[in-house]
Amino acid sequence: MLAFEPNQAGRHSISLNGPDEAPPARDVLPRAQPAHLLRVPPFPKAGPVAFAVPRRAATDALPDCEIDSALELIRSRKVGGNYWGSQPRLPEAPYTLVRVRDDVQRSTALGGCRTAVAWRDDCDPWHLLSGASAVIIDADDELALIAAIARVPVECVGNGRFAALAGGPSRSAIRRLFRTFVVEESTHVDPYSGEPIGLVDAIECCGFWRRLIDSNRNVSGAVGFAFWKRDTVAPLLWAGSERVTFMSAADGVRTGDRIAVWKSRTPARVLADLQRRSAAIIEVEDGFIRSVGLGADCVPPLSIIVDRLGIYFDPARPSELELLIQSGDFSSELLDRARRLRELIVASGVSKYATGHAALERRDPSRRHILVPGQVEDDRAVVSGGGGLTNNLELLRRVRAEAPDAYIIYKPHPDVEAGHRTGAIPDELCLSVADEIVRKEPISALIDLADEVHVNSSLAGFEALLREKPVTTHGVPFYAGWGLTRDLGLVPERRTARRSLDELVAAALLLYPRYLDPVTGLPCPPEVLVRRLTESKADQRDGIVVRLRRFQGRCRRRLAALGQMAAIR
């Protein structure tokens, strides 16, 4: 909270201490050890990584045009310093920012300004600079350089490395200091791989983290998140200055608070309480590339989606994903990246819960092979996105009616096979419609084998599109209605755009989900997670919770099988 304190001149200085706190001590403006201008935010549970490392040898100087481009990029991405810091309420612009160590000089600076803000280390410098008309600062403080890059006039106190920024610094002065104290002091490495990267890539990496953090700044809490998910979800919901507040009830939620909710794991009474309090619900669900292992087995997700409009699998109303697909402006660079990501996924055999390849022989070379993936029948994606079709056996019957001569392969959903969810079909009944039931083969290999894939609303249909297989939808999944599938369900009329496969991939895998690198614990691009899963570096060892959950599933499967046998007899 900001406290306004009148001074003798009738002007106001603004402190970042609360109104009930003791007056600031001499070290009110604590100084961290010198750090590189571009750095990694302290995401929850993340380990230390190399990013800016001392330059060991001289290198060819960057030309002025590249320095200018880097400065413009830093300014547009708003990175540098503690860009993840808090964003306190500020006075109306313009105001003067003051950050001076010496008590006398600081008092003089604060007293000489109509409205002044004392600048602390724990604040986002770009937020504080947003309405500043001037900055008074020690000449050796890196924030003088940030202010100059932000084009805010700087008044330097004392002699220090950035004293040349005083007054109205020329472009050449900013360029020279940036080259000396940023470019020539350090080089950058990819925080995920450790490989050398250029300055522009380092700035964009910081920009990627900043956008994620900024998107979370208005999230007040999180409800419905199982304890075993929290460690991997927390970095993806972190707002920078505050830890993620996981709650089991709506206690303390105020009108208008924005609450991240995992709806399928939130009791109805809590959802009703949030509604009574007029809280804004932000839906969170597993991402499309999730983990090696099942959520039903308590394997935590390495990818989530966060949607403020709805949820991607409910066609009753638009979601953020649907708007991205419908109205997105896809650059050639983004589409090229989407194509490369799609090729990487296909080559590695990555699917939502698994990785790997298997070469499968065709069962009957003379017949068309159709793969039908089963789903969890009471899952929200089926109930809301199935268009009234919520039964796996009925889906199989519809496919058989569509293709009476085809060789139909049925793969039960992994959560159903694990014994945790509903949707099992007795084998004898299933084989009265399908030609074969497959259980152990990876879905990616089955898609490769199939000539067509028929789905209700399963993500397997999207994975089949990635592999350029014909897909028929009987429900209304998010990828239906864009000209890429044969749709038998009632697709909303608002889906009017016709999209290429790479445009769909760009929206669904690059722009919409959030991903976590299981090695560093840092939020990452999808390419990093795909490579980790491919290299078996997910490092999600089976803990006691996972082992107990799998044992429970085996017991349920055996009981269900006994029940099916008794029913048949």
Image: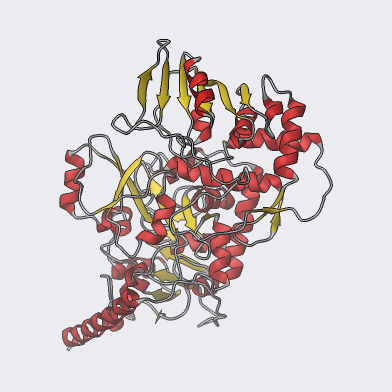
Indicate the colouring scheme. secondary structure
The residue sitting at 69% across, 35% down in the picture is: 161
**Residue 113: where, in percent of width, then height?**
49, 15
Q: Quadrant of the image for the C terminus?
A: bottom left
**Residue 326: where, in percent of width, then height?**
48, 40
Q: Is 510 placed left or right of 140 in the picture?
A: left
Residue that lies at the very extreme toward the right in this rendered image: 60
Please indicate, yes or no, whether residue 498 appears anywhere in the rendered image. no
The residue sitting at 17% across, 46% down in the picture is: 272
Please indicate, yes or no, whether residue 246 appears anywhere in the rendered image. yes
The residue nearer to you, when weighing 16 against 253, is 16
Task: Give above or below for 24 relative to 40.
Answer: above
The quarter of the displayed image where residue 194 is located: bottom right
Task: Give above or below for 44 relative to 328.
Answer: below
The residue nearer to you, when weighing 330 against 553, is 553
**Residue 94: where, in percent of width, then height?**
49, 17
